[in-house]
Amino acid sequence: DTVLYFEGERGHPFRILRAVKNRFGPADEIGVFEMTGTGLAQVANPSALFLADRGEPAPGSAVFAGIEGTRPVLCEFQALVAPAPHGMPRRSVVGWDQGRLAMVLAVLESRCGIPFAGLDVYLNVAGGLRVSEPAADLAAAAALLSAREDVALPRETVVFGEISLSGAVRAVAQTENRLKEAVKLGFSQAIVPPGCKAPASGEMALLTMSDLAGLVGGVFGAG
């Protein structure tokens, strides 16, 4: 007795098989497949796949260290912020929740003094992946700030953390697994909530953020 969703964006060769109900096993597990000329082929390392097309550091990009079921998965959040030509700003998002985008923008405006009025905002999760966990809030905020301030994050940086309505950055689950996956893929710095511990290997430097204002001023020099 199980319910499976077969997900994927049109135009992307990748598909996600997600277990949303499973009477005899864990739910929220995923399998990642690539559509080939001979059928679906399993993807053994989804993180490497979703980050394969990243180029040089560019404004509007932030790598999120997420968890899908019990599996750590890294993916890229991409943002574009541009003047609204007709006075009616657009808010468009693909692969993430529209409501959480609105919340992050509101917190940036009201708690950090970063205005988005009069600006079109576009947010995309690269590769066709759909992200639902609140831990992606900080990565989305980093991508939005990077796009608005025209400042690129270092290529070797990953981001995760939940943002509250007060602007505080809250701890999330499975931080160790997120950081280990990032180290395996060559990342050496992480922007994280308070309380995270760096991997024992010493290959990851942590930049701790207790609130969103720290990201705004400390990383992007805005506000």
Image: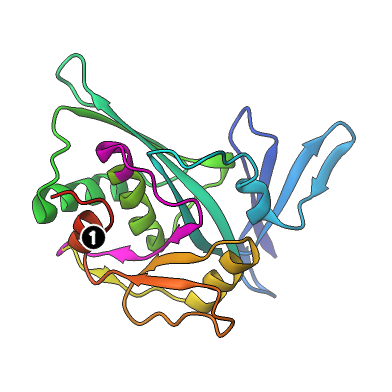
Name the residue: 24% across, 72% down.
210
Q: Does any portion of residue 4 appear in the rendered image? A: no
Question: How many numbered marks have been drawn onto this rendered protein structure?
Answer: 1
The three-letter code of the residue at mark 1 reads Gly
The answer to whether residue 153 is magenta is: yes
- Whether residue 104 sits left or right of residue 155 in the image: it is left
SS class, disc 1: helix
Name the residue: 45% across, 55% down.
132
Q: Give residue 46's position: percent from left, percent from top.
A: 67, 54
Q: In the figure, residue 162 lies in which quadrant?
A: bottom left
Q: Does any portion of residue 138 appear in the rendered image? A: yes
Mark 1 = which residue?
218
Categorize mark 1 by other alpha carbons within 10 Å: few (<14), some (14-19), many (20+): few
Q: Give residue 101's position: percent from left, percent from top.
A: 30, 46
Name the residue: 72% across, 57% down.
45
- Whether residue 136 sits left or right of residue 212 in the image: it is right
Name the residue: 76% across, 52% down.
43
Work out which quarter of the rendered image holds the N terminus and state it.
bottom right
Q: Give residue 34's position: percent from left, percent from top.
A: 75, 42
